[in-house]
Image (spheres, helix red, strand yellow):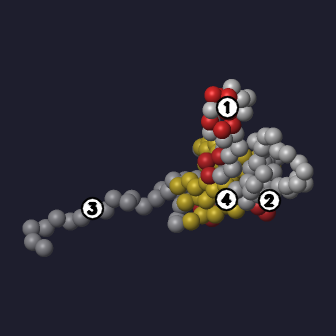
């Protein structure tokens, strides 16, 4: 075992793997808020719009998913030395609970140069007060 610790590839065995499947939190996202909208920018390198879904679930849950294609494996005589870019599917899923003051029916999304931009317009109209006063009586 002592010879193993002197071997140059020991870090690939003892450390966390260099290659990690692109999933969930790996889809890097920025969330900006302007006076008129919430803007989400998500890195989606190599994915086309056909491979990305933007959906609203359960009222105000923004779900963004992507499914990449599997990269061609090289011939059986090829030896992989490092696989950091990934050789499997490039899948991801991000969920964001949106604030209540947004116009869900006016959400727009576009992808360009490996970045998905989702614009969620704000609703400036006042919402009904969610606090309801209950009349108190001496008898039920």
Q: Decide: marks 1, 3 in contact (CB < 8 A)?
A: no
Sequence-earlier tag: 1 or 4: 1
Where is mark 1, residue-wise?
Answer: 4
Q: Residue furthest left?
A: 138
The answer for how far apart the CA atoms under marks 2 and 4 are is 14 Å
Camera-nearest label, 3 or 2 = 2
Q: Is residue 3 left or right of residue 124?
A: right
Where is mark 3, residue-wise?
Answer: 133
Sequence-earlier tag: 1 or 3: 1
Residue at x 42%, y 61% (from the top left corner): 128
* Mark 3 burial class by Cα count in 10 Å: few <14, some 14-19, many 20+: few
Q: Nearer the viewer, residue 26 or 60?
A: 26
The answer for how far apart the CA atoms under marks 1 and 3 are is 72 Å
Sequence-earlier tag: 1 or 2: 1
Where is mark 2, residue-wise?
Answer: 69
Up/down of 117 relative to 140, above or below? above
Element under disc 1:
helix
Element under disc 2:
loop
Where is mark 4, residue-wise?
Answer: 65
Camera-nearest label, 1 or 4 = 1
């Amino acid at each position: 075992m002592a010879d193993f610790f002197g071997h140059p590839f020991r870090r690939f065995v003892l450390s966390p793997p260099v290659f990690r499947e692109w999933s969930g939190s790996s889809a890097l996202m920025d969330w900006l808020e302007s006076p008129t909208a919430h803007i989400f920018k998500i890195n989606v390198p190599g994915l086309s719009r056909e491979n990305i879904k933007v959906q609203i679930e359960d009222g105000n849950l923004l779900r963004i998913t992507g499914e990449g294609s599997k990269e061609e494996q090289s011939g059986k005589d090829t030896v992989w030395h490092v696989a950091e870019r990934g050789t499997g599917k490039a899948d991801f899923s991000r969920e964001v609970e949106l604030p209540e003051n947004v116009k869900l029916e006016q959400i727009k999304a576009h992808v360009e140069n490996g970045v998905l931009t989702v614009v969620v317009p704000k609703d400036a109209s006042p919402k009904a007060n969610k606090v309801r006063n209950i009349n108190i009586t001496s008898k039920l």
